[in-house]
Structures are given as structure tokens and as C-alpha cells.
Amino acid sequence: MGLAWRTMSVALENRLEVLRSYSRFRAQSVDRFARFIETAPEEVLFRTSPLHFAASEGVPENEAIDLFLRATHAGILEFTWGVLCWGCGSFLTTPAALRSLQRARDCHMCRVSVEVGDDNMEVAFSVAPAVRRIRFHQPESLDLRRDLLSLMFSQSRDIPEDIRRTASESVVDAISLPPGGVHRFTARLEEGQTWFLAVPLHHLWCELEVSPEARTSAVEAELMDGRLLPGKVQVRAGEVSVTLHNRTPSPSRVALVKFWIPKAQLACGMDGLPPPPPMRRYLSGKRLVTHQTFRELFRAESIPSEGGLEFKSLTVLFTDLKGSTELYERIGDFRAYGLVREHFGVLRDIIAERGGSMVKTIGDAVMASFAEPTPALEAATAMTREVRRVRREGAQLQLKVGLHTGPCIAVELNERLDYFGQTVNVAARVQGVAAADEIAITEPVYGAPGAQELIRAAALSATRERALLKGVEGETTVYRLREA
């Protein structure tokens, strides 16, 4: 056992050297991450979040996200996409990652269709077996009395300890059913109780409803690819048997559960129910997709091939570098090209440090995306400061920046993630409105939480005007931001 652990430690240390070689990571951040991987409980290392790590270890969120992504690329972590049910907090997995996301997922426990949106796509990380084996790497062998809730729910949902104890006591019988296997569960059911035949790893449930009108006490159920049939059946009170046939090619961990939640709360889509319990902050799919490191390292984690992925709100930033043509004429193509490329590198770093990603360059212009408006505005102010600094050193360059927030469609174009829609068009047009050394933003950006505080802290004056933008119906409110 000692030798095996030393081997795992060497495997981890070799991969940690890759992280330590990355200059943007502080040494203490990598050390804390290494300690986390080596010492955290196994259930913590299953579907964890970089935001939870950041909060507990005092690491900035964007650094933690970057650290987790590079650790994934180095083979220390693996990530999983999931859709969260707002009613129960279930982490509905997507086996084929981002490509498999659909317009909606079914929560079989709540019996509702869960719309896939900006904020209920969670990306969770688990330790890779190459560096540390945990029991969740063999889900067919898990003790569901201990791990039922870990399989079902996001770690971002805080579950009280008394609920965890009750859930553990509610697992009446659990087995690993091999492909083609058959098992009969038996239990005594009383009226007013809710029982489930559950395949928690795949979020599949067959509800056993005790009804005085029911005549049967024997149920035949089938586990198929992505389905457990029937989904609900009425049985009479007393001794009940449920015979399950595994029609899938894989072993599955199955349990008979006496449910711990009152029956009225199971239908999470019903009006009048209390709001869902609060959840800890987690890494949303939107925030990950707009992160520069994800864009650079995980091109294969592409969006759905048909129709793209729709975001209800995304912030798009455009820049344009003024004075580059004169620069080419004044100092020559080679030196000017080098300065322009350096400018792109500086802007990319500024974007990445604020959690955004550079989508593409178009001539001397840059297009970038951010999950939220305020980090984009912070990046814009840093960009203009940097270009002014370069100008003071002799390069006669000026920057124009435009930002807009709104709905957007992410698509795969030439094996790269790109964005389309009116939000992109408006952001480009607003950049065209901006004068040199000016940031032009729309009302949704100006009114975003923290935006006006940021404008005051950056000592920028804001001038409001109504502008006609090409291709946009009516006038658009634009705020011009300049050094006061």
C-alpha cells in the first residue's frame, strides 16, 4: 500500500511540475492545490468546483479556474458537464460533454423538464485516477447508503447533516446489477409513503405510489439506455416486490429507497412550493466557455453541432487600434508588425486575467467575450491605460473600445468557438461610435452591478447620448467613457 501511494505521489508531482512551470500561477496556489488533491476526502474530490477551492484556500477565482483547467490538461483532474434541476439540485450529467447539451433535460425524480440555461449548466471537476484513485472511479461498487446524495446532487447544494443521515437510513437495499442481470427487491410499503427504485448515477427513478385502488403488489421494471421503465406505478399497501432487468451493456448500481422528502415537494415544477434551497456559487458553463484557457486547451469540447448553444446574456467587446497604418509608414513593416503583435498579446493577457477570452482578431481589431459585463468593462479600462502607456513611450497608437451585453448564440466555426447574433452586431457598431481613447458602452453594461463604481474608480467621465447604429432599428443609448 505504501509503495502504491508513493507511485501515485510521483505521478502527481510530475504533473504538478507542469503547473509550476506556468508563470501566472503563484507558488502558494499550486502548493495549496497539491495539498488539496493529496488530502481532501474522496467525496470532496468528486465533482468539485474551482470556486469552492478558491473560497476555501484564498485563491482568486480566475486563477483557480485557470489552475483547474491546466490541471485537467495535465491529467490531474477530469471535468464533467451537468445541468442542475432548480427544484431538487440534481446534477444531471451529460455523458458526451458540451456537445450533448440539449434544449432541456428531464429530471426523473421531480418529473419535470429542466430548461438548459446560462446559469444552470455546471462544470464540475473530479480527481483523475492516474494521480489518486477514489471510490467514485468505480461507481458500480459504491455503498449507496454513504454515497447516494453525492451521486445525485451537485456539491454546490448544501445538504444539512440530518438530511444526509436520513437519506443514508432510507436506502433499504442496494446492489450492482450486471449486464443482463435480474434482481428482485422486496419491502413492506405503507400508505402515505413514497418509495423509489433508483439508479442514482444516471438520475433514473421508478416511483412506487401506494394507492388503495391499486391491485398489484408485483412490479416488473426494465433498465434501458437512458430510461427506467415504468417511471411510476401504483401498488397496494403491504409486501411489494420489484423485479428489475438490466437491458444495458454496463453494470449499474441500483437501490430501493424509502424517500426522505415529503411527497408534495417532489413535483418541483408545481406552483406554490417554497423556493429551492440556496446553492453555493459554482462554475457555470457560460463562464467556462468564455474563459481564455478553456478556449486554448479544449477545442474538442465543442458546442452542439446543430443550432449552436444559446446564451441569454453574454458580454461582447470589440477594440480597434488607431494609428497602425501611420506606424507602418513611419517605422517600417517589420517593426510595426512586431508592435501590433505585442499589442494583441497585451490585450489577450488583460482579457484572460479578467476571466474573458479573445475570440478572434480582425485586422487590427480584437473581439472578446465575457460571462458578465463588469469584468469586460474592467478589461476595457485596463486596455486603454496600457495603450496610452505605449503611446507615451513613442508608439502613436490609440484604442477604441465598444461593449454590449445581450443574448448570443455560440457556434463552431472552423473548429473554433465563435458568436453570432444581434448582440455581436451592436457591440461592433458601438465600437465604431467610440472615438480614439474612448470606451463606448450600452445601457445594459452601464447598468450592470458594479459598473458605475468601476467607472468612478477609474476616474472616467460618462457622457450619455442616443446613437443610430447601422443595422439596428431605432436609436441606441450609448455612454462614452473618457479620462476625466
Image (tube, rainbow, N blue to C red):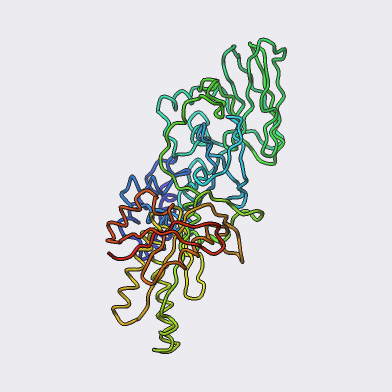
**Residue 198, how many percent across, how many down?**
60, 29
**Residue 465, how many percent across, how many down?**
41, 59
Q: Quadrant of the C terminus?
A: bottom left
Q: Nearer the viewer, residue 283 or 286?
A: 286
Q: Nearer the viewer, residue 460 or 306?
A: 460
Q: Nearer the viewer, residue 236 or 327?
A: 327
**Residue 406, how many percent across, how many down?**
50, 53
Q: Indicate left or right for 223 with 43 as reference.
A: right
Instruction: Give the residue at x 69% y 39%.
Output: 225
Q: Is residue 340 above or below residue 272?
A: below
Instruction: Give the residue at x 44% y 25%.
Output: 163
Instruction: Give the residue at x 44% y 39%.
Output: 156
Q: Indicate left or right for 187 with 479 as reference.
A: right
Which image quarter: residue 348?
bottom left
Q: Is residue 169 above or below residue 48?
A: above
Q: Is residue 38 above or below residue 434?
A: above
